[in-house]
Image (cartoon, helix red, strand yellow):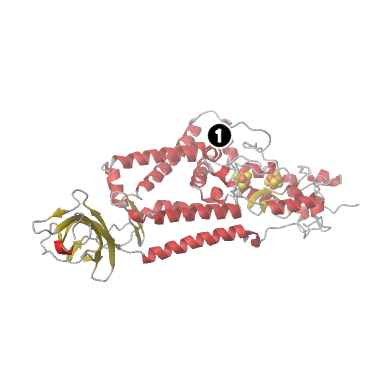
């Protein structure tokens, strides 16, 4: 039986491809993290010098980096007009005032369940992303990944690409090396300081704090926070890099439980790549069946984790997809289909492997996945968008949307006025000279809008009772007018008095009702105590 050729000599560009192939040199690269064999719990760090690469996933990573860093550094400087009684910083965690401002939303401490809801949504979102596209969070948006990428870009700009950096590492210390190293670490430190500096601006008015910080008048906690964040950013982003993902982060361990056979992961398709050979021409001339991998190690050289993805799925792989870009570049030069390394599901991989190995009965023969024209046969499973829509991901989407809608509804309809009451415990009541009974309360009025409000406090129930508000010159009656500052809680002492003839029980419930002139109101049920046995 004659096997179809692995590469179709009549395919356009084939001659050029063969020429390219002979030009492709194996990149000198060593795997640092490996899935093969038993590994100790910790291995001393071997420096990884990832090579620069271009391609669609690299472009996507640049864009994500730009957006995420832009959001982080610029957000504290955005202004949002909330009137004269509230800060005008768009995003502010005001710890001293007990408020969280997010554009038009203001969260009070008693509304922290909104933050809890957001965290739950973030958790479900992470489940959704992981079950569909694997560790996309790690590869694209995790702060560790983003800052390491930024530090690497600086390193590459100052010291050159991989080969130049390796050479520099091995060179003796001279003026050039010292200058380059000093420049690199100085820029890294600047980035680290900017990172720590941006963080503190989320907790106070950014322009004011920046001035105070520069003139040495900022609170000590600001300097300590910047110092700690500078040190951690510099160490994690510049010095430890992949070690943080491998040894410090729990997420790689957790995410393994979230993947299923339909999750996309970065995969080396050995069903078309093996047996690999650097001597394609010779192998083809000898009639050997060889795979698409030309063993150039471009995928290893660009990997920021020092992984050879051809060894299979590995916990250290952050699925940044840079090896896909590198290999796609090689395949382009060879005139072969892209996707020798690709995002693939375990299910598709298994199906293709079954074709290449005749259902697991023989060694991989990539000729089995190609037709007479040298192209991949139609039976080869490819990624379909529909794979992402399966019961599990739909449940995640439904849960995420439901929580989001509930929170949105609660946010839109939440009260901006509240009242809470504390009854005096000692004494619970006082018997006045005319036999009437008086109870004392601390009434807390919460005005949650940035405008001054005059509130009407009144009694609902408790027949015949009147009240007197401490510190206010108002006659005893069933209502009282109380002014509350914008965005403030006001606590007032209230004494409620009920004539003796109206008291029919030891405990009576009634309501404190509060209302503003626009009709917004709130109520609190309180208890009025009287001596036992009074009828
Ligand atoms: S193996 Fe590929 S996807 Fe995984 S970390 Fe390395 S370059 Fe990124
Ligand atoms: S998988 Fe692609 S990039 Fe990696 S060695 Fe093979 S051909 Fe080169």
Residue 134 vs residue 282, the one in the foreground: 134
374 up-or-down from 307: above or below: below
Residue 7 vs residue 156, the one in the foreground: 7
Give the residue pinned by disc 1.
Answer: 168
Position of 187 compared to 287: left or right? left
Instruction: Specify whether tag 1 is near ligand 1 (CB below 8 Å).
Output: no
Residue 3 vs residue 493, the one in the foreground: 493
Q: Residue furthest right?
A: 1
Q: Quadrant of residue 245?
A: top right
Position of 224 compared to 527: left or right? right
Q: Tell me the residue at 28%/49% (across/down).
A: 96
Does the image show residue 490? no
Position of 433 compared to 76: left or right? left
Residue 251 vs residue 426, the one in the foreground: 426
225 up-or-down from 450: above or below: above
Label 1: state its secondary structure. Answer: helix
Q: Tell me the residue at 49%/41% (across/down).
A: 237
Across and down, in percent, residue 46 comes to 58, 33
Across and down, in percent, residue 6 comes to 81, 52
Position of 141 compared to 54: left or right? left
What quarter of the picture does the C terminus occupy? bottom left
Across and down, in percent, residue 421 comes to 25, 56
Across and down, in percent, residue 268 comes to 69, 47
């Amino acid at each position: 039986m004659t096997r179809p050729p692995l590469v179709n000599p009549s395919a356009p560009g084939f001659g050029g491809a063969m020429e390219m192939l002979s030009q492709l040199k194996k990149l000198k690269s060593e795997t640092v993290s490996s899935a093969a064999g038993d590994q100790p719990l910790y291995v001393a760090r071997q420096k990884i010098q990832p090579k620069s690469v271009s391609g669609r996933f690299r472009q996507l990573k640049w864009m994500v980096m730009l957006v995420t860093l832009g959001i982080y550094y610029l957000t504290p400087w955005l202004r949002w007009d909330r009137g004269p009684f509230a800060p005008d910083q768009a995003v502010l965690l005001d710890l001293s005032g007990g408020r969280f401002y997010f554009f038009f939303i203001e969260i009070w401490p008693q509304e922290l369940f909104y933050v809890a809801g957001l965290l739950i949504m973030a958790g479900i979102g992470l489940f959704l992303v992981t079950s569909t596209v694997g560790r996309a969070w790690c590869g694209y948006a995790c702060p560790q990944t983003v800052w390491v990428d930024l530090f690497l870009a600086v390193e590459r700009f100052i010291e050159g690409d991989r080969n130049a950096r390796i050479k520099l590492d091995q060179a003796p210390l001279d003026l050039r090396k010292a200058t380059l190293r000093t420049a690199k670490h100085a820029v890294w430190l600047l980035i680290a300081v900017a990172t720590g500096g941006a963080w503190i601006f989320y907790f106070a008015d950014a322009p004011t704090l920046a001035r105070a910080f520069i003139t040495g008048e900022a609170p000590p906690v600001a300097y300590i926070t910047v110092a700690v964040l500078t040190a951690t950013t510099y160490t994690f982003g510049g010095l430890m890099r992949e070690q943080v993902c491998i040894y410090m982060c729990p997420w790689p361990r957790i995410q393994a439980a979230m993947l299923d056979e339909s999750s996309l992961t970065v995969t080396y398709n050995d069903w078309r790549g093996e047996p690999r050979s650097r001597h394609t021409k010779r192998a083809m001339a000898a009639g050997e069946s060889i795979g698409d991998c030309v063993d150039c190690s471009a995928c290893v050289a660009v990997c920021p984790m020092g992984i050879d993805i051809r060894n299979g799925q590995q916990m250290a792989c952050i699925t940044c997809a840079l090896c896909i870009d590198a290999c796609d570049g090689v395949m382009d030069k060879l005139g072969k289909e892209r996707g020798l390394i690709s995002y693939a599901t375990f299910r598709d991989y298994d199906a293709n492997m079954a074709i290449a190995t005749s259902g697991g009965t023989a060694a991989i023969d990539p000729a089995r996945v190609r037709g007479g024209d040298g192209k991949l046969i139609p039976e080869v499973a490819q990624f379909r968008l529909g794979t992402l829509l399966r019961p599990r991901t739909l449940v995640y989407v439904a849960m995420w949307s439901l929580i989001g809608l509930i929170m949105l509804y609660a946010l839109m309809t939440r009260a901006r006025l509240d009242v809470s009451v504390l009854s005096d415990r000692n004494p619970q009541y006082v018997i006045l000279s005319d036999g009437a009974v008086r109870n004392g309360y601390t009434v807390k009025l919460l005005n949650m809008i940035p405008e001054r409000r005059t509130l009407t406090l009144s009694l609902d129930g408790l027949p015949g009772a009147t009240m007197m508000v401490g510190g206010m010159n108002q006659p005893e009656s069933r209502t009282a007018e109380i002014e509350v500052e914008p965005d403030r809680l006001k606590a007032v002492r209230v004494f409620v008095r009920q004539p003796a003839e109206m008291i029919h029980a030891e405990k009576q419930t009634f309501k404190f009702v509060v209302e503003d002139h626009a009709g917004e109101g709130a109520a609190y049920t309180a208890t009025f105590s009287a001596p036992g046995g009074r009828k």
